[in-house]
Image (tube, coloured by chain):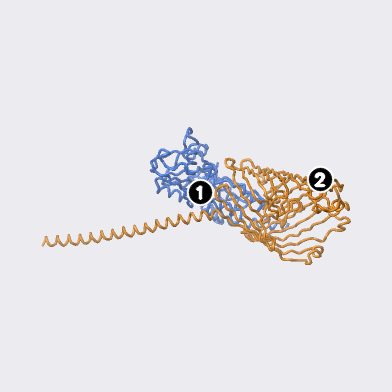
Chain colours: A orange, B blue
């Protein structure tokens, strides 16, 4: 009996043990299977992470500025209508950063009827010189009003002096930039073709223009004030290819010895910006620039002497400035006032100035940030031109604009 | 007068609830501050989220947070964005000190590193623990995502070159600590407050210097070579409830919490 009982117990234990071993084996199988799956998932995550890291190096941003404009009576006569809807800018900016300190930027503008390449440049941090970057390609000229993106700017357009001396804002060239961290200094020097207005793929003469800019920033944290001030200088030239006659700024006519001579253009600017944390933030921004701008005559080489004297190359002493007051009202609104002045020829005034008349322009704007992406601006611009025999009265060219900007 | 009235009312209205966003290094500290402050001031609501210093600074510029926590100073490019949008330079408030801690597994034989060695490890020039007096095993690198202030701070102040592509980016210092805890050949970095279950590497400026672990004494005396401030940033000088909250943080009670959490007071 005892023997039988022992056999029975042994059998039960054996069967139980066997089943437990089987369970353990199957559990091991399950673990191994899941381990395999996890390893496979790990590999897939690594591949996805690598792909994502590549995609993270490409940044796409941009903005669309759609607006409605209403013109004064004289602009209505010129245009044939007194109001219009208009796509001012529609830009997409692609930035690729393959490595730390290396950046490629491409920015086309798709506004209606105006597909244009705005930016196309590479930026490289110079090894061993931590805060120095080298830029090459088509980019903004080194000037505050030019470099301040129209998507951030408080007024809809730049000051008249800026748009005149830096047409199209961009140039093709190479730039060195030092942006100090411990010493709050910005230094930029750019060499460029010098004649770019948006279409010339190559230079039109052999000489290159040079522009340098220096800005120093002062912070007074206890007063909540920051001041940026600086200066810039532009030195360049235009080639007189077809006409040796030059009309000076004072109206006198001179002659170069021959054609294919260079006409200097050079100017010096000063800039200041004061930021103050007063009831939500405000700033005063100003820039003054004066110098000589030359314009090469486009008269044909075959033209008569009289025709050439009538359409000479031009040397114009010019001056211009702007002063802008920006006041934040709460977190979502800004009130802006700007006064800007531009005189294309400071040596002549009245009837002698002919069409080189000065402009004094007031601009008033109110901006509302609907959210981080959408900004609505209402602006009234009042240009007042100098009157003379050629321009008997102030043109009725005031402009009211409502703009919606979507930025991403 | 009307504009002034609008400005004042908008300012007052914006103080009703305070949102705080930014540094993951500071998120526990910020939550402790908020909890205790709200307990003592039941009428106040303080909402704290992490995401990284970069995320916090972007939120400050976008206007989606009142206070940004950052474990690194704001970059010039970020200040320029603040100037463009709000016409201020922002307000920087150092609120705690931290030693960027180098985490090693408790079983790792290596216990001391120079700044140069840390740089060489994270740029991939030193690949094996044997080169540092440890066992013959490949070094596994753990780090933070590039939105992290600690990532940027270590890069700018210590690594000073591109991080190696083999650095595994993890979301938050806690994840880095956890990874090093499980990996005998792992190395990570982060704020001192998170270091549980791992050991701190002693850090020295160079081979001839004394090595220090981050501690209240070594941080206060700036002996620990990777000492930094932790910051709060605001768009404008604080007023109302925000000012009251910041004053409290910089006061005795707020700074006591800094020590409790594992960081070091500014005063």
Mark 2 touches mark 1? (CB < 8 Å)? no
Q: From the viewer's perspective, tell me whether residue B173 is left or right of residue A224.
A: left
Label 2 SS = loop
Location of residue B108 with respect to B60 vertically, above or below:
above
Residue lying farthest to the front in this orientation: A302
Nearest the viewer among A332 and A364 is A364
Q: Quadrant of the N terminus of chain A?
A: bottom left
Q: Position of residue A58 (x, y in %)?
A: 56, 55
Location of residue B120 with respect to A36 vertically, above or below:
above
Q: Position of residue A210 (x, y in %)?
A: 71, 44
How far apart in space, not on screen, are marks 2 and 1 (Cα)?
A: 71 Å
**Front tag of 2 and 1:** 2
Q: Quadrant of the C terminus of chain A?
A: bottom right
The residue marked by circle 2 belongs to what chain? A
Q: From the viewer's perspective, tell me whether residue B267 is left or right of residue A1.
A: right
Q: Which residue is mark 2?
A: A258
Q: Which residue is mark 1?
A: B25
Nearest the viewer among B235 and A17 is A17
Quadrant of residue A216 within the rendered picture = top right
């Amino acid at each position: 009996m005892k023997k039988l009982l022992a056999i029975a117990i042994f059998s039960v234990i054996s069967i139980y043990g066997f089943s437990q071993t089987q369970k353990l084996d199957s559990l091991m199988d399950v673990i191994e299977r899941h381990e395999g799956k996890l390893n496979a998932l790990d590999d897939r995550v690594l591949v996805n992470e690598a792909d994502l890291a590549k995609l993270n190096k490409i940044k796409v941003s941009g903005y669309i500025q759609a607006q409605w404009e209403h013109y004064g009576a004289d602009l209505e006569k010129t245009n044939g209508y007194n109001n219009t809807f208009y796509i001012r800018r529609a830009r997409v900016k692609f930035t690729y950063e393959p490595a730390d300190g290396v950046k490629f930027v491409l920015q086309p503008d798709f506004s209606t009827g105006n597909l244009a390449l705005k930016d196309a440049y590479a930026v490289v941090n110079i090894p061993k010189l931590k805060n120095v970057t080298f830029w090459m390609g088509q980019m903004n000229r080194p000037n505050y009003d030019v470099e301040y993106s129209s998507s951030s700017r408080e007024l809809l357009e730049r000051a008249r002096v800026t748009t005149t001396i830096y047409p199209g804002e961009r140039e093709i060239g190479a730039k060195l930039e030092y942006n100090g961290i411990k010493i709050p200094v910005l230094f930029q020097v750019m060499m460029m073709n010098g004649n770019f207005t948006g279409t010339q793929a190559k230079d039109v003469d052999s000489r290159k223009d040079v522009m340098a800019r220096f800005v120093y920033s002062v912070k007074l944290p206890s007063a909540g004030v920051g001041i940026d001030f600086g200066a810039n200088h532009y030195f360049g030239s235009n080639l007189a290819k077809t006409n040796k006659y030059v009309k000076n700024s004072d109206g006198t006519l001179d002659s170069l010895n021959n054609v294919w001579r260079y006409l200097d253009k050079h100017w010096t600017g000063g800039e200041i910006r004061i930021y103050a944390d007063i009831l939500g933030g405000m700033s005063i921004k100003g820039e003054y620039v004066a110098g000589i701008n030359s314009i090469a005559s486009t008269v044909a080489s075959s033209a008569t002497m009289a025709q050439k004297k009538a359409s000479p190359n031009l040397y114009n002493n010019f001056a211009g400035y702007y002063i802008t007051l920006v006041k934040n009202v709460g977190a979502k609104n800004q009130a802006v006032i700007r006064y800007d002045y531009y005189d294309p020829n400071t040596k002549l005034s009245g009837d002698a100035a002919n069409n080189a008349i000065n402009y004094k322009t007031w601009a008033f704007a109110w901006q509302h940030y609907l959210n981080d992406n959408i900004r609505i601006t209402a602006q009234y611009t009042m240009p007042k031109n100098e009157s003379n025999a050629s321009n008997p009265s102030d043109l009725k060219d005031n402009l009211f604009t409502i703009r919606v900007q979507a930025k991403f | 007068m009307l504009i002034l009235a609008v400005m004042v009312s908008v300012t007052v209205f914006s103080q009703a609830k305070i949102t705080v966003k930014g540094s993951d290094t500071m998120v526990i500290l910020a939550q402790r501050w908020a909890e205790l402050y709200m307990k003592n001031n039941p009428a106040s609501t303080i909402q704290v989220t992490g995401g990284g210093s970069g995320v916090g600074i972007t939120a400050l510029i976008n206007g989606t947070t009142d206070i940004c926590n950052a474990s690194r100073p704001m970059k010039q490019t970020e200040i320029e964005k603040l100037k463009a949008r709000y016409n201020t330079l922002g307000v920087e408030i150092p609120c705690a000190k931290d030693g960027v801690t180098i985490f090693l597994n408790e079983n790792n034989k290596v216990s001391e590193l120079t700044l140069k060695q840390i740089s060489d490890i994270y740029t991939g020039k030193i690949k094996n623990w044997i080169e540092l007096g440890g066992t013959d095993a490949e070094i596994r690198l753990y780090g933070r995502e590039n939105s992290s202030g600690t990532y940027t701070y270590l890069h700018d102040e210590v690594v000073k070159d591109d991080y190696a592509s083999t650095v595994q980016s993890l979301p938050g210092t806690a994840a880095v600590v956890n990874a090093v805890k499980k990996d005998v050949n792992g190395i990570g970095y982060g704020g001192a407050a998170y270091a549980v279950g791992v050991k701190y590497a002693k850090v020295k400026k160079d081979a001839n210097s004394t090595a220090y672990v981050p501690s209240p004494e070594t941080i206060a005396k700036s002996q620990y070579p990777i000492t930094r401030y932790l910051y709060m940033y605001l768009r404008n000088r604080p007023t109302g409830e925000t000012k009251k909250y910041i004053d409290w943080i910089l006061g005795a009670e707020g700074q006591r919490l800094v020590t409790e959490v594992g960081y070091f007071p500014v005063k």
